[in-house]
């Protein structure tokens, strides 16, 4: 059985000639993922399976992380991995606080109104800045957009893949 992996960073380019990579973080926990000694996996189309890697050094530059890996010493060794991703395995996921969820825990859940009506399945989560918006795919209708706020998202049961929501006035139109 193939191990479940989760993206934590995207390789956007190389940096310098010593094999450093410019990484755009796609995790809520960049301080934990991109620190000296962190063990991750490098995935790229040129690799048959993800390659285990260890961060040798890291520094932040604007919105990117400049990462040097123990496994590579020069630009020629890393250039081919541009466009690849850094990943963590399922068992290396960080435990969340109560009431916090990973996106993939929510996507695929059925959305039920507080009146007991099945509204559809959550198909995506949009990051808007102020709050996330959960996209509910409805059969034969436009998608329903639900803001992730206490007044709207009432209860989340990850184990049952079910979310209880209050559809605020104006959202169903």
Image (spheres, rainbow, N blue to C red):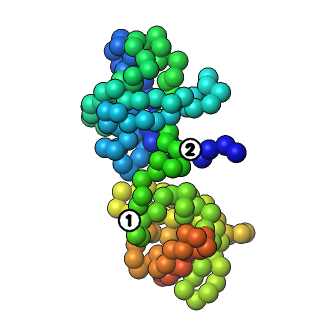
- Camera sees residue 171: no
Residue at x 54% of width, y 64% of height: 106
Q: Which of the image's four quarters has the C terminus?
A: bottom right
Residue at x 42% of width, y 53% of height: 94
Find numbered disc 2 in the image and state the secondary structure of the residue it sits on: strand
**Residue 1 at x, y percent in the picture:** 70, 45
Label pair 1/2, CB-CB below 8 angstroms: no
Residue 97 numbered mark, or none = 1
Q: In which quarter of the image is residue 63?
A: top left
Find numbered disc 1 in the image and state the secondary structure of the residue it sits on: loop
**Mark closest to the chain's N terminus, 1 or 2:** 2
Q: How dense is the environment of label 1, judged by Cα within 10 Å: few (below 14), some, or many (20 and up)?
A: few
From this view, report whether residue 13 is shown above or below residue 97. Answer: above
Q: How far apart are marks 1 and 2 (CA)?
A: 21 Å
From this view, report whether residue 92 is shown above or below residue 45. Answer: below
Residue closer to the observer: 92 or 143: 92
Asked if residue 139 lies left or right of residue 107, the reply is right
Residue at x 49% of width, y 24% of height: 82
From this view, report whether residue 24 is shown above or below residue 143. Answer: above
**Residue 148 at x, y percent in the picture:** 43, 69
Q: In which quarter of the image is residue 115?
A: bottom right
Q: Quadrant of residue 38?
A: top left
Residue receiving disc 2:
5
- The residue sitting at the right extreme is 140
Residue 79 numbered mark, or none = none
Query: How many numbered markers are drawn?
Result: 2
- Camera sees residue 72: yes
**Residue 152 at x, y percent in the picture:** 45, 77
Residue at x 46% of width, y 36% of height: 40
């Amino acid at each position: 059985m193939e191990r479940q992996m989760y993206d934590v960073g995207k390789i956007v380019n190389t940096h310098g000639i010593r094999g450093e990579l410019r990484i755009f973080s796609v995790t809520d926990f960049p301080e934990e993922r991109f620190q000296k000694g962190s063990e991750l996996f490098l995935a790229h189309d040129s690799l048959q399976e993800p390659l285990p890697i260890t961060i040798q050094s890291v520094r932040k530059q604007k919105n990117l992380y400049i990462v040097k890996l123990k496994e590579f010493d020069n630009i020629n060794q890393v250039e081919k991995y541009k466009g690849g991703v850094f990943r963590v395995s399922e068992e290396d996921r960080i435990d969340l606080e109560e009431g916090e969820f990973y996106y993939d825990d929510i996507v695929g859940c059925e959305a039920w109104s507080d009146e007991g009506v099945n509204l559809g399945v959550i198909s995506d989560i949009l990051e808007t800045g102020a709050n996330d918006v959960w996209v509910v795919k409805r059969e034969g209708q436009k998608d329903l957009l639900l803001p992730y706020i206490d007044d709207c998202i009432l209860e989340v049961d990850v184990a049952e893949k079910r979310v209880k929501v209050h559809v605020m006035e104006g959202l169903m139109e």
